[in-house]
């Protein structure tokens, strides 16, 4: 029943993708988010679901991806930049150097790239992402081809999760905690974001660690960082879990990915501009930036993730999904920009009681989409205070409730072990 509600709500949402953040879009996406959280409650309540329920749930998830996949991308979606970067590489240009708005390259544009967002800066995406753009656009140069590729990554994560859950001896129904998250339909099939490729590579690394495939784990992690830099904060989790020569091999592979872009110096593109100028949904970073230098605020976002990873690494010798989720969540919490699709990195690892605040965050972030709608009406590019309070307040409440429940269970278990009790 909850799957049917999710499907109906997301199909309605897909029909309003062109007015992202408008009332019909928000109402239908919020309804799907509520249904998703109710489904999570059911997943916690049962140790195992019948196989047919899991299969039907995955089939439903595939079904509601289709209308988003066929919907045209919004003019300011990043996928248009991906097409541009892939096209530039195939034409012999460096995406870290060429500025899309430069009149000298106006003839290189197509109908899909002419209106891409932030045309005054070169590409900020790392080399792994760039080569992926080139590979996909070599097959077919279109936003649709990239969206199809991202949906394939999405489905690959679901199938890999089934294997991970089997090895963890957990119910296969927990794959639906990933597959049913509404952000996947909107941001992978609908808008097409590269983050899902990075999440797949990171899950490959996690699964390889569980099997003691150290070289594969190191390579998967390095390639994930080569897609976007966010997972670099997980580096402490690999301490003494991968061999030095495996780490050096992975680093060498990433270095080779940058070789095609070294003809104009260090290929960092507009990463510096991104940190200096771009701001969205950043209450922690925004408050720190008011009283401290920009470099300090940006460094704190990275440090928060590293410290969280170090604490989790020292606490347990085993590698858990929550240990992968929380360092990235801590870094995002302190980041200058927190778009909804950034949370895609957390989804494959958020399937336990300890990650319930993160699961709630993937739903409570939905109201921030209204900023896109308000901008079309002439409003400012800024998340209002009440939206921020709703988003992060929900996360705090979920964290408090989760901690209280853990303490309650611990007290009950101690009482049951006490002979005097």
Image (cartoon, rainbow, N blue to C red):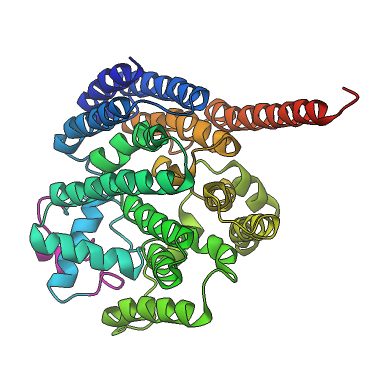
Towards the viewer: 142 or 95: 142
Q: Residue 90 lies in magenta, yes or no? A: no
The span picked out in magenta is: 94-112
Furthest toward the front, the residue is 419
Furthest toward the top, the residue is 1
Look at the magenta stretch and give its main secondary structure: loop
Q: Is residue 119 above or below residue 241?
A: above
Towards the viewer: 74 or 203: 203
Q: Is residue 315 left or right of residue 18?
A: right
Q: Quadrant of the N terminus?
A: top left
Residue 103 visible from this viewpoint? no
Q: Is residue 382 above or below residue 262?
A: above
Furthest toward the right, the residue is 420
Query: Residue visible at 47% across and 55% down?
Result: 277
In which quarter of the view is residue 226 placed? bottom left
Residue 271 at x, y percent in the picture: 43, 65
Residue 246 at x, y percent in the picture: 45, 78
Residue 51 at x, y percent in the picture: 31, 29
Towards the viewer: 52 or 4: 52
Q: Residue 101 lies in magenta, yes or no? A: yes
Query: Residue visible at 28% across and 24% down?
Result: 10
Q: Is residue 74 left or right of residue 406?
A: left
In which quarter of the view is residue 19 placed? top left
Residue 218 visible from this viewpoint? yes
Towards the viewer: 309 or 175: 175
Q: How many tags in the picture? A: 0
Q: Is residue 140 above or below residue 34?
A: below
Residue 292 at x, y percent in the picture: 69, 57
In which quarter of the view is residue 339 placed? top left
Q: Is residue 88 above or below residue 153?
A: below
Query: Residue visible at 22% across and 43% down?
Result: 75
Q: Quadrant of the C terminus?
A: top right
């Amino acid at each position: 029943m909850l799957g049917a509600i999710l499907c109906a709500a997301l199909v309605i949402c897909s029909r309003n993708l062109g007015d992202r953040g408008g009332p019909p879009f928000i109402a239908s996406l919020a309804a799907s988010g509520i249904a998703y959280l109710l489904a999570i409650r059911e997943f916690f309540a049962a140790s195992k679901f019948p196989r047919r329920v899991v299969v039907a749930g995955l089939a439903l998830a595939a079904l509601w991806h289709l209308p988003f996949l066929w919907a045209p991308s919004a003019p300011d979606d990043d996928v248009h930049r991906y097409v541009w970067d892939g096209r530039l590489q195939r034409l012999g240009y460096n995406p870290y150097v060429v500025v899309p708005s430069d009149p000298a390259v106006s003839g290189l544009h197509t109908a899909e790239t002419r209106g891409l967002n932030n045309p005054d800066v070169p590409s900020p995406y790392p080399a792994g992402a760039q080569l992926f753009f080139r590979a996909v656009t070599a097959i077919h140069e279109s936003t649709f081809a990239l969206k199809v590729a991202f949906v394939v990554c999405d489905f690959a994560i679901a199938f890999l999760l089934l294997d991970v859950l089997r090895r963890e001896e957990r119910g296969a129904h927990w794959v639906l905690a990933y597959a049913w998250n509404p952000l996947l339909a909107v941001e992978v099939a609908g808008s097409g974001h590269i983050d899902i490729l990075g999440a797949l590579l990171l899950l490959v690394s996690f699964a390889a660690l569980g099997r003691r495939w150290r070289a594969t784990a190191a390579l998967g992690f390095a390639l994930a960082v080569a897609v976007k830099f966010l997972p670099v904060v997980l580096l402490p989790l690999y301490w003494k879990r991968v061999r030095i020569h495996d780490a050096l091999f992975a680093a060498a592979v990433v270095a080779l990915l940058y070789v095609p872009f070294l003809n104009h110096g260090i290929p960092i593109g507009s990463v510096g501009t991104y940190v200096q100028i771009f701001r969205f949904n950043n209450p922690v970073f925004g408050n720190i930036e008011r009283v401290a230098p920009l470099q300090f605020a940006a460094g704190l976002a990275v440090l928060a993730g590293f410290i969280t990873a170090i604490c989790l690494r020292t606490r347990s010798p085993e590698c858990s999904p929550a240990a992968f989720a929380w360092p990235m969540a801590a870094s995002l919490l302190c980041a200058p920009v927190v778009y909804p699709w950034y949370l895609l990195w957390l989804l494959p690892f958020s399937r336990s009681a300890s990650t319930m605040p993160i699961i709630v965050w993937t739903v409570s972030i939905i109201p921030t989409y209204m900023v896109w709608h308000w901008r079309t009406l002439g409003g400012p590019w800024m998340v209002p205070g009440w939206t921020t309070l709703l988003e992060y307040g929900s996360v705090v409440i979920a964290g408090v409730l989760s901690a209280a429940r853990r303490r309650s269970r611990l007290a009950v278990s101690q009482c049951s072990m006490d002979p005097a009790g």
